[in-house]
Amino acid sequence: MYARIGFEVSYADINNISGISLLILLAPSIWNTFANLYLYKYRQPGGIGYSAIITLFTIVLLILCSYIVAFTGYWLVSVLAVFGYIFLLIALYLFFSKTGFTQWIAVLFFSLLMLIWLSGRIYSSVHTPLFLENLAIGMAKMDTLYNSSIMQMLKTYNISSTGLDGTPYLAYHWGSHWILSRFSTLLDTTAVTTYNLVYPAIFICLYFKASLTLGVDIFRQFIKSEKTLPKTGFIFWFTFLLVQIGFMPYSFLYNWAIWDSWIESESYALSLIFFLTFCSIALWMYNYVLKSSPTYSKLLLLFIPVAIPLLGILKISVLVIALSAFLYVFLKLQLFRNISYILISGVTIGLSYFVLQLTATTYTGEENNNFYLFHFLKSQMISNWKGLFYYMHYFWTILYIVLRCTKFQEFNVSTIKEAFFSNKFIDIELLVIISLIGLLPASVFRIDGGSAFYFTDIQARLACSFLMAYVLVDSFEMNSSEKTQKLIHYFRKYALLFPLVVFLLLSNIFSSFEKAINMNLASRIQFASLYSGPKGFLEGATADILHYTSGKKSDVYYKLRQLKYIPPAGLEENARYTFLKSLNQLDKLPTEKKHSLAIHIPKKHEWFWNQSLENIYATPFIIPSLTGIASAGGLPSSVDAYHFLNYGYHTYKANLNNAIYKPIDEGNFCRYINEREIFAKTILFINPESFSIDSLACSN
């Protein structure tokens, strides 16, 4: 909210989004509290997997609410948001009343550091609180426009498409776009707000929730006690920050193509949320379904052929990894001895293949799907650093395996063999299998744009939960005195290393935060430069502020103060900003009305087509992403091979040079839309410079 100081802010949106986020995050703990008080006679509250099940149930419930909110009115969202704030008050009361001073100080301290890092990391790359404003000065990211367009077409037409010239189906992992479209409908937010506020406030937080929940569930599985509450002190929360943020400088990690794309990529983040959640539910199934005798409980295993294929709609890479892990467990636990499990596995594989066909592009060109040994290493890494790729990329997995093996008093061939056949090493085995399967596409195929990373990185996300579980087990096995002695021992042993790790971690936290402030200030300075009137509103700003945003000086507190001294006065005179705001107002039209419309901006308006953005291939996505209405004749005059394949242009014609990219005879526009199967009754011809709209009625 502070990042938009001086701009228009919707406090209703912020209130509803925050409330819904709290509702999802806190629902499991509130339910367990209620169950402890009133349902203890009928069931054991809490336990392995219960938090994940309740979280998943809450998400599904909210998605269902998104379909009825148009009939009930948006008061329903406000009520749900209020429940979220009530849950927060209850959770805070329980937390402060049941935890010691040291524990809640640790939680508050590390939460503050995480908040600083998150706000910086999220808003220093693809996402920005000033997206529409930046779009007016040509600074918007193409990926956000592209993904927003798909989300909007799903929201309006219930089809995966970019909406540049009608709505032909786009084979893509559109699951995250669909989920975001449902939350956009529920919260009544625009695509801009959904991607830049709803996604960070709800789903990034959900990722951490899923990662922590799985860590706690693994801990309970290790100690074979589902009722035990974990001891989350200083060491645990420090580990949490360390594995999630990382202590190595990001610029250093980029040498091995190690990115924190689970923040930037909505599809990857959402797929990880559900993957980690399903892992927790899988532990619950192992304990309460596979080991139980009633036949009706076995019906719950039907969740598997639904859950695993659905991961593919979110991200194909996560489907491949999840399916591989499932098949390994199927073989390792010898589930093939039961015909029911064989049928479930067969259906899971069949549905996964169907999802793969549904989401994989049918277009193949030289950019993708070629046999190319070690393409990821050769194309994404600096040559001098390639030798350390495997160690750096699999650092967290290697660290967990080493720590886990130290728990064995005698580590030899005999104990390893015994542990393998008794499934005591199943956690290590799964991490190794996931690592190897994830490495195959990066080693064998050419996957353009560095997307092989989405295969190789999953093991690191899972290893984070295992490491947190390891810390909890280690803490559980020691009393306070032993923990203090062990901590002192480690401090002495790693006296030089520990301060270095801490300082590098803090550097990552505050450098990301400062980068986000720099980007915000840079935009504000450009807005101010557009203003031709008196510059009295800059009275509090310092003349050398440009030195601060360029990185020549560093003072985070000083920069935060400057935000209020550089308001967006220049935007009020910016014709492009006025046009974009007017265009965005069309998104408020009822869905039924949008169905009957299509938008066309004639190619003669170069002010829009050639001057909106430096990347002219991103410009066409402005219309569907801001309006939620498909374009008619909205394709560029030509397109290069990279954008043709990676941004959905191939869905309109199967070659680069085709007639539909040529100017359209506006006198025969109705015939054109009939040929393109654009089922719009009215075409809106928009003049972007004056924002005048002419309409043309067409009969289909």
Image (cartoon, rainbow, N blue to C red):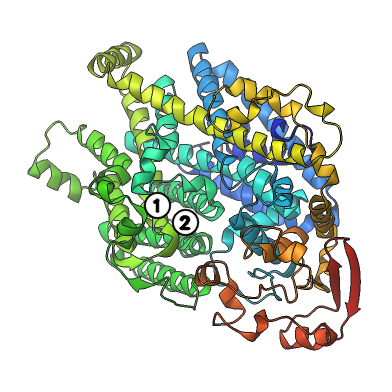
Q: Nearer the viewer, residue 611 or 354?
A: 611
Residue 273 left/right relative to 634: left
Rendered-image quadrant of the N terminus: top right
The residue positioned 50% from the left and 24% from the top of the image is 110
Label 2 and label 1: CA atoms lie apart by 7 Å
Query: Closer to the N terminus: mark 2 or mark 1?
Result: 1
Q: Is there any visible trace of residue 226 in the rendered image?
A: no
Circle 2: residue type: Ser
Residue 108 left/right relative to 407: right
The residue positioned 68% from the left and 63% from the top of the image is 619
Q: Which residue is mark 2?
A: 297
The residue positioned 46% from the left and 44% from the top of the image is 260
Counting other residues with Cα less than 10 Å from the Cα at mark 2, is it few (<14), some (14-19), or many (20 or more)? some
Q: Give residue 10's position: percent from left, percent from top.
A: 80, 40
Q: Is residue 479 above or below residue 683?
A: above
Q: Give residue 614's position: percent from left, percent from top.
A: 63, 57
| Element assignment for label 1 | loop
Rendered-image quadrant of the C terminus: bottom right
Residue 31 left/right relative to 348: right
The residue positioned 80% from the left and 89% from the top of the image is 671
Disc 2, disc 1: CB below 8 Å? Answer: yes
Q: Is there any visible trace of residue 201 in the rendered image?
A: yes
